[in-house]
Image: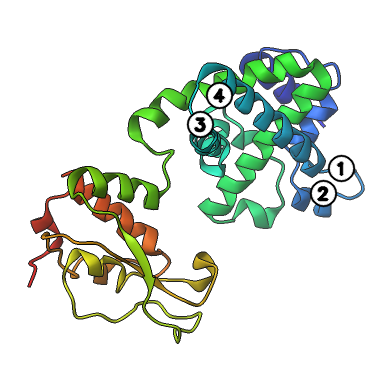
């Protein structure tokens, strides 16, 4: 096997020369590749991913703790935004991980979502390989360059907030109201896609939102009730794709309150 491409990657992207280059190659080796090359490959990257995940979380936690004085809850949300699959997958793509991935023929034809997860896993595995071969400080430098450098943008966009927290903050600041979630039905099966409603007030934004019980953690769909004079049409909700959940609707409400989406763009209210 020609490993020169991995050595070049280490020098150009990671700024190191690996003593044990096999560690880096293994970091890019998916389990599916091992299944197709059992005679020539003996290890996949899941153990390195396990190690790298811990190193990544420690470095991010150390940075947030030493740099900011916010309470634990906010620091936890900030950390989650930095180490979530989307963030580290994007970093892996930016650093050119994809051409180096060793995947089975089937995984190469996988969905974009599956590929994003594989990239995120390989990022953690590379962190683990760096830690083993070059030590904590080298792994830390790479994490700062690839992940922590994006934190300023995360703060500016507010993407670290979960949709419900974002909605609550906007509702309290602009509508002087706090969303309250109440059970409206106990009969919806796990396959329910839309919950019926004839209302067109903002309260109804979750009424017909696509709901999957697996995302809610129970079979009980929830909807927010909060006093408001704004009216939103349900015409837009009818166009929401079935794979989306109530968080989509919450984000739309947030965008309306932030005036990023004019109310009349969603259709005519009754």
Question: N-terminal of the two: label 2 or label 4?
Answer: 2
In this rendering, the answer to whether 91 lies above or below 269 is: above
In this rendering, the answer to whether 9 lies above or below 75 is: above
Measure how far apart labels 4 and 1 are at the Cα level.
34 Å
- Residue contact at pointers 3 and 2, CB within 8 angstroms: no
The tag on residue 71 is 3
Left or right: 1, with 101 as reference point: right
Single out the mark in the foreground, 2 or 4.
Answer: 4
**Which element is circle 1 on?**
loop
Q: Which residue is mark 1?
A: 43
Q: Quadrant of residue 187?
A: bottom left
Left or right: 116, with 155 as reference point: right
Left or right: 93, with 18 as reference point: left
Question: N-terminal of the two: label 3 or label 2?
Answer: 2
Disc 3 crowd, CA 10 A, few/some/many (<14, 14-19, 20+): few
- Residue contact at pointers 4 and 1, CB within 8 angstroms: no
Disc 4 crowd, CA 10 A, few/some/many (<14, 14-19, 20+): some
| Residue 223, horizontal then vertical, whole percent | 34, 69
Question: N-terminal of the two: label 4 or label 1?
Answer: 1
Single out the mark in the foreground, 4 or 1.
Answer: 4
Q: Quadrant of residue 46?
A: top right
The tag on residue 111 is none
Q: Residue at x 79, y 17 (%)?
A: 135
The tag on residue 64 is 4
Single out the mark in the foreground, 2 or 1.
Answer: 1
Q: Which residue is mark 2?
A: 34
Q: Residue at x 46, y 76 (%)?
A: 220
**In this view of the protein, which residue sits in the foreground, 90 or 10?**
90
- Residue contact at pointers 2 and 1, CB within 8 angstroms: yes
Single out the mark in the foreground, 3 or 1.
Answer: 3
Measure how far apart labels 3 and 2 are at the Cα level.
44 Å
């Amino acid at each position: 096997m020609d490993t020169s491409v991995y050595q070049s990657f280490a020098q150009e992207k990671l700024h190191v020369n690996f003593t044990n280059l096999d560690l880096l190659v293994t970091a890019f080796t998916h389990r599916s590749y091992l299944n197709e090359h059992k005679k020539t490959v003996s290890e996949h990257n899941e153990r390195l991913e396990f190690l790298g995940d811990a190193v990544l979380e420690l470095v991010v936690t150390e940075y947030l703790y030493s740099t900011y004085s916010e309470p634990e809850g906010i620091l936890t949300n900030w950390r989650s935004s930095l180490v979530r699959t989307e963030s580290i997958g994007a970093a892996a793509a930016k650093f050119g991980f994809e051409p180096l991935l060793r995947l089975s023929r089937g995984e190469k034809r996988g969905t974009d979502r599956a590929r994003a997860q594989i990239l995120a896993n390989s990022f953690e595995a590379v962190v683990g390989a760096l830690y083993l071969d070059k030590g904590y400080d080298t792994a830390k430098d790479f994490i700062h360059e690839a992940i922590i450098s994006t934190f300023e943008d995360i703060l500016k966009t507010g993407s670290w907030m979960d949709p419900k927290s974002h909605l609550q903050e906007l509702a309290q600041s602009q509508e002087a109201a706090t969303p309250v979630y109440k059970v409206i039905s106990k009969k919806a099966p796990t396959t329910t896609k839309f919950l019926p409603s004839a209302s067109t007030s903002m309260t109804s934004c979750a009424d017909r939102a696509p709901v999957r019980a697996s995302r809610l953690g129970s079979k009980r769909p929830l909807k927010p009730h909060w006093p408001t004079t704004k009216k939103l049409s349900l015409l837009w909700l009818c166009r929401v794709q079935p794979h989306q959940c109530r968080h989509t609707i919450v984000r739309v409400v947030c965008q309306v309150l932030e005036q990023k989406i004019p109310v009349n763009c969603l259709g005519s209210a009754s």
